[in-house]
Image (cartoon, grey):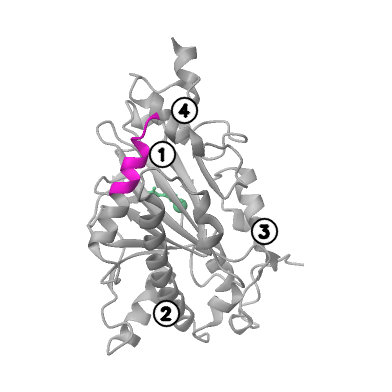
Amino acid sequence: MATTTNCKLLLSDLAFTVKNVPSNYIRPVFDRPDLTDVQKSDASIPLIDLQGLHGPRHSDIVKQIGLACQNDGFFQVKNHRIPDTMINNMLNISKTFFKLPESERLKSYSDDPSKTTRLSTSFNVKTEKVSNWRDFLRLHCYPLEDYVHEWPSNPPSFREDVAEYCTNVRGLVLRLVEAISESLGLERGYIDKALSKHGQHMALNYYPPCPQPELTYGLPGHTDPNLITILLQDDVPGLQVLRNGKWVAVNPIPNTFIVNIGDQMQVLSNDRYKSVLHRAVVNCDKERLSIPTFYCPSPDAVIGPARELIDEDRPAVYRSFTYAEYYDKFWNRGLATECCLDVFKASTV
Ligand code: OGA
Ligand code: NI
C-alpha cells in the first residue's frame, strides 16, 4: 500500500488518503514547529493604510513604511487599489486549478527549478532530505508576453485572469518600491533602476490538510531571496513570522496584502531594512492557499549596498554580486534556517 501511495508526484493526490504523515515528511525532533508556542497577538505586524500615498498623507505613509521595514521586515497594506473582486477571483481560480484531475495538473509538472512555468511539490525535490507539506505552481510573470503562453490553459480563464492580477500587483510593487527608496533617503527611482530589467514571479501555494501538523512544515523557516514579496493568503491561518525570537501568527485580514522585505532589499539598504525569517505551518482540518508575488532583480543585475548608505560608520556589509549568483545559491542550498545572505558578506579584513 505505502509504495503505491508514495509514488504520487504531487502531495494533493496523496494527502487525502493518509492517516499518518509519511516518513519522508517527518522532521527531526529538534526541527519541528512547536505549535503550542506561537503568539496569536492581533497586533503582530503593522497594518498600513495606503490611501493618500500620492496625496496629503504621502510623507506620513512613507515614514510608516520605513519604520515597518526597519523594525518588522513585514507589514500589511489596505487601500492598495487592487479591487476585492480581482483578489477573490485569483483565490478562486487557484483553488479550481488544484482541484483539477491529476492528469490535467500533471501537464505542468516539473522538478527542474530553472523552468519558468512549473507545478511541483515541497521545495526542491532534487536536493532536500525532508519534504514539505505543499504543492505549488510557479509562474514567471514579467514581461507577461514572454511567459503567458506557457501557463496552464485550464481553468479556461486562467491566463487572462492571472495576467490581470499580475499587472495590478506590479503596479502596487512599483508604488511601494518608490516609497521604500524615499524612506531610505534615496532618489525615488533608485531601487527601480538598481534592478535593471525587473523580474516578477509568482507561486500558487497549496497546503492540503495534514493529519499530524506538529511533525512537518508547509514551508520551514526561510527568508525570501528576492527584493520584495507581496503575499495574498486565503482565510486560513498558517503564516508565522519570527519576532524577537518568537514565532508570531499573521492572521488573515480579508482584502489586505502582506508585504515583506527580501534579501536583496536588505543588501541594497546596507542592513537598515531586514529580511525576516518566516514559515508556513499546516493544520488538520483545512486546506490553505497562499499566493506570493516575488519581485526580483534581473539575473544579470549587480546588487550591492547603495553608495549613499555606506560611510565610515557604516561600511558596506555585503560585497557586490549578480542576482543570478545569489538565486542559484538559494535554490541549491535548500531552505536552511541561517540566511543565504551570510554567504555574501563583505570580507572583514
Ligand atoms: C513563500 C512563503 C508563506 C505562506 O512562499 O516564500 O513564505 O504563507 N509563503 O505560504
Ligand atoms: Ni517566503
- Taking the magenta stretch, the answer to whether it contains residue 97 is yes
How far across and down, in percent of the image, does residue 251 sit?
A: 26, 52
- Which quadrant would the N terminus be assigned to in this image? top left
Left/right placement of residue 155 relative to residue 323 reads left
- Distance between the alpha carbons at the discs numbered 1 and 2: 32 Å
Residue, disc 1: 218
Using the image, tell me which numbered label, if any, was put on residue 324: 3
Q: Main secondary structure of the magenta part?
A: helix
Q: Residues within 10 Å of mark 2 (few under 14, many from 20)?
A: many
* Magenta stretch, residue numbers: 92-101
Badge 1 or badge 4: first in the primary sequence:
4
- Distance between the alpha carbons at the discs numbered 4 and 3: 30 Å
Badge 3 or badge 1: first in the primary sequence:
1
- Distance between the alpha carbons at the discs numbered 3 and 2: 26 Å
Mark 3: which secondary structure? helix
Badge 1 or badge 2: first in the primary sequence:
2
Q: Residue at x 65, y 74 (%)?
A: 316
Badge 2 or badge 4: first in the primary sequence:
4
Residue, disc 4: 25
Evaluate if marks 1 and 2 touch, with contact meaning CB atoms under 8 Å apart. Answer: no
Badge 3 or badge 2: first in the primary sequence:
2
